[in-house]
Image (spheres, helix red, strand yellow):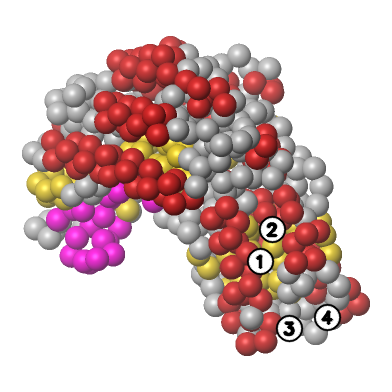
Amino acid sequence: MSQALIQLGHQKKAASPSGSGKKTTVGFVNLGCTKNQVDSEIMLGTLASDGFELTGNPKKAEVVIINTCGFIEEAKQESINTILEHAKLKQSGACRVLIAAGCLAQRYQGDLLKELPELDGVVGTGEFGKIAVICRDLLAPKTRRQRLWISQPPYLYDEMAPRLRLGAPHSAYVKIAEGCNRNCAFCAIPLMRGKQRSRPVESIVAEVRQLAGEGVKEINLISQDTVNYGVDLGLRQGLVSLLGELVKVNGPRWIRPFYLYPQQVTDELLDLYAGEERIAKYIDMPLQHINSFMLKRMHRLGDRGTIEMLVERIRTRIPGVMFRTAFIVGFPGETDEAFDELKRYVEQAEFDRVAAFLYSDEEGTSATALSEKVDRSLMEERRNELLAVQETIAAAKNVERIGSTLEVMVDGPAEEDGHWLEGRHEGLAPEIDGVVYINGSDNRSVPGPGACVKVQITDATTYDLSGHLLGEASASEVQTPGGRGPRGGYR
């Protein structure tokens, strides 16, 4: 999610630390990934349940909390800029306390306090559950000094944690595990989030039942290493077991796992995807590179041959699957030949969606010690080349969908034109993949957010589709977004 200061409506007022009865307001900025978003939702729920008033107007907030991201250089710079921007509110607004929380806070700890004297507190990823207590401590008149709340990150929320969800009411993220056991040379996540800690299946199922009771129709499962879910709990095929239980929960139309590492992908898992109608036919699997030498240098398991076989196996066993992946360009030692190999592979593989990230040295990772660094300008040139290739592929795939009838979940009125609706088919994840614009002007009743409808596709751009609303959706009448034939077909 990009920077978003969020308006959460009226909450119970909090008494001031001095006991004067004056309300205490909190403004919140969430940066980074959807895993950060869930952390923000837990902190917001904790603050609201403790009586704080949450406001979307930063000038009125006495406490401003920035939930930071520290994944790559651009994210770190965005976090620092956001802290500095909101520090100005100590002069121009009501701000008395400024807090940095999350990954950047966990990683740089005391350095942040030293380099950013505007900060009053730094809260690591293991202290989210204490956020209300921390705010009150920093507001207390006799404790006006910079303070640090950092511990090893054992914190893992459960279904009982208070939570105020951001975004659409019909779509929710559920974090099934925290941390990561992988040893990728470029990644600092284990340094910020610790080793993998999976939530029990029962806890996740209970949370999904609660969300279903609130009207949620799309469950997005997230973690750092989703395919490895449950290994730390002694589960042999934890994700298969979890999905098998979640599909029994009444209410949600789509269950969408994110972040599958390209190893330990079993036939049982793929068959579950193919056979369960409510598991979205959508694979999100960052491959990072295709050149075997680069993969080894990145400390990724497997080589080009194993990746090609896996991609083919996924497409064979899940007909019509939409495939999203990500690659890193400019990793140390990436030659022109290695990049050309990656570009040719993207042309040949015809993925539905591709993200490309620039490599950056991250303190504490093994890649920082590698020689043969790639110039930033060359990295940017390579990323642009790769994305240009993918744009051509994505545009052609969308054109092929013209004339098909797809099941689309309505998200609400289109931002550009309120006469149109905006939604997504199962191959479009929220916020990152594009939308389907729905012309519903000829229909008497307008379907609300979360409704699943039939849409005949009439037009396409590179990443978005447009079409006419035909009525309520029935699985037997619609096509998979990845194919041209009936459900189960594959192009």
* Residue 246 image point, x, y percent: 49, 29
Residue of label 1: 65
Residue of label 3: 22
Circle 1 or circle 4, nearest the eye: 1
* Mark 3 surroundings within 10 Å by alpha-carbon count, few (fewer than 14), some (14 through 19), many (20 or more): few
Which part of the image, by quadrant, shows the C terminus? Answer: top left
Residue 177 sits above or below residue 167 on the image: above
**Is 169 in front, or is 95?**
95
* Residue 301 image point, x, y percent: 55, 20
* Residue 114 image point, x, y percent: 80, 66
Horizontal arrangement in the rendering, residue 233 relative to residue 323 (left or right): right
Q: Which residue type carries mark 2?
A: Ala
* Mark 2 surroundings within 10 Å by alpha-carbon count, few (fewer than 14), some (14 through 19), many (20 or more): many
Residue of label 4: 19
Please report whichever mark, 1 or 2, sits nearer to the chain's N-terminal start.
1
What is the span of residues highlighted in magenta in the rendered image? 412-439
Circle 1 or circle 3, nearest the eye: 1
Q: Would residue 330 be visible to someone looking at this image?
A: yes
- Callout 2 touching callout 4 (CB < 8 Å): no
**Is 329 in front, or is 149?**
329
